Image (tube, rainbow, N blue to C red):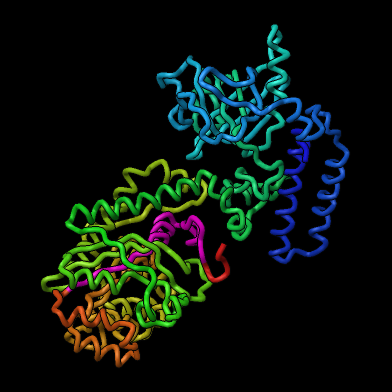
Amino acid sequence: KRFLSKSETNIEHEILKKVNLINEMKEKGAKKTDLKPHFDELLDLKIKLESIELSEEINCSTIENYQSNNPKIIMLPDGPKPKINYGDYEVIASRHQTNRNFLKISEISDECMHINKIVWVRGRIYNIRSKGKNLFIVLRGNNGSTIQIVKFKGNDSNSEDNGKLIKFLGAVPLESVIEVQGNLVSAEVKACTQKSAEIQILKAFVVSRAKSVLPILVEDASRSEKDIQTSQNTNRPFPRLGQEIRLDNRYIDLRTPANLAIMDIQSGVSRLFREYLYQHGFKEIHTPKLVAGESEGGSDVFRLDYFGAPACLAQSPQIYKQMAISSDMGKVFEIGPVFRAENSNTRRHLCEFIGLDLEMEIYEHYNEVLVILHDLFKFILGGLESGYVQAISTVREQYESEPVIFSNEPCIIHWPDAIELLRENGYEAEDFDDLSGVQELKLGEIVKKKYKTDFFIVDQFPAKIRPFYTMPNPSDPRYSNSYDLFLRGQEICSGAQRCHEPTKLLSIMKEKGVPYEPLKSYIECFKAGCVPHGGAGIGLERVVFLYLGLDNVRKASMFPRDPKRCA
């Protein structure tokens, strides 16, 4: 174990970029002749790395030697102990409180009240460069905001101490967490989000050191496809990080400005969903995720042993939110995990996702639910556009997309009309078969062109492709009182009026081959009398993925679970 000099660290990063590029070329089927110059460059880099003398940047040959000469620092109310201006903290384990006030990097500007004052900040080292005897560091805050911090060696009596601090910081690995005390001054800085101020370092302490060489770099993970593509014809092409290496190192991948913004927007969708429903008289419930038998009578469940009895992870809160209506709760909603054991390796399917579910009493028609759903999404999407402007802009800097077009009034298309729209535009579609992903996308294009909206509702789906608890259409039992909501031509929400009449429900279950015993208590609740009701289930990650125009739902999930990934 030893410190790497800055030169070594830079070469290690170049090696990592070259390895990623070679792997990317291999995945695309590159020939050996195309790969050879890149292997030659990789070999040259490795030879160069081995030839560098460690003493070039730092005199300590090992971490142990450095630590023996430089004891760990404890921050006390009266300052650091020992009384030095740089070094590594002892592990922060709630031993002391100094009552220092830390500024958030995102709130720093030349107009803030702390300008020309001494401040404390904490952040990660995003980039380091030296110019002459001076050091420039880009420090990144929790939300991706960045500020430049600088140290000038100078020629006065402090120059020797300044030089030691510069040498110390220059050897700290990228992504390490540091705390800095310094003078906050006005400055023009183009390369940071905080462009009108910088911090002149007085003291700097390492809170947590990152490894010298990380599997991926935040800088590489933050580039847009356009920037990567443009660089391929230059002497220093940027590496293209594939989805798997990103997900294998998701804890680093999530640090990019775009991914942090995606998580902010995901949080915003949940908050706005909850706010709207509270405002409209809904109450939040929490239903079991351990279910006897199979939660909806289907086969795509994760089975488990429940003290010797068969059970599964809930496919949805469907059964229990209906029982809540039977219990006279009127209007309910839930935000919680949903589990689907579907072996679907597509860009829009996950085995675990967050469900935004609602259920409500209806008086005459399921259109009452559709009005709520349309207004709900108008509230959510409008809230994102007004309250998450910076986050949306940050995402679109890396992942380009067009804003969502949303109609003021509900755009509802009956199933037969949707099929006819596809046929009129040259696409095959069966009357009673479910739509394929391709058909959904084509329908989305047609609807957008005809009705000028990216968001629309299709109702009256064929009964045979809907769950057993769906109320049949009273005019034609081949269809049902069901509906799906679409965004950019893909389904984000599925719902229906539920069958609350037990005799009819039992008949449908028998017809569909759904076992009675695991659902006995569910059936019994309707025998005790139940109001007509309907509801819907929304996939949080799919809403975020489609709203932002991302290419894969995994980008909208913090730690995605799919058939090939459970870690």
- In the image shown, does 83 or 419 lie closer to the viewer? 83
Does the magenta segment cover residue 7?
no
Magenta-highlighted residues: 533-561
Q: In which quarter of the image is residue 427?
A: bottom left
Does the magenta segment cover residue 548?
yes
Residue drawn at the location 41% of the way across and 41% of the way down: 390
In the displayed structure image, the side of residue 124 where residue 238 appears, left or right:
right
- In the image shown, does 11 or 394 lie closer to the viewer? 11
**Quarter of the image that includes the N terminus:** top right
Residue drawn at the location 72% of the way across and 31% of the way down: 171
x and y percentages locating residue 403 in the rendered image: 38, 52
In the displayed structure image, the side of residue 159 where residue 178 appears, left or right:
left
The reply to whether residue 472 is visible in this rendering is yes
**Quarter of the image that includes the C terminus:** bottom right
The reply to whether residue 445 is visible in this rendering is no
Q: In this view, does 258 lie above or below 186?
A: below
Tell me how many marks there are: 0
x and y percentages locating residue 557 in the rendered image: 47, 58
Q: Quadrant of residue 504?
A: bottom left
Q: Quadrant of residue 5?
A: top right
- In the image shown, does 280 or 311 lie closer to the viewer? 311
- Looking at this rendering, what residue extends furthest in the left direction? 363
In the displayed structure image, the side of residue 318 where residue 239 appears, left or right:
right
Q: In this view, does 230 lie above or below 198?
A: below
- Looking at this rendering, what residue extends furthest in the top direction? 157
Residue drawn at the location 72% of the way across and 25% of the way down: 70
In the displayed structure image, the side of residue 88 where residue 399 appears, left or right:
left
Residue drawn at the location 24% of the way across and 53% of the way down: 276
- Looking at this rendering, what residue extends furthest in the front direction? 307
x and y percentages locating residue 459 in the rendered image: 26, 75
x and y percentages locating residue 510 in the rendered image: 30, 92
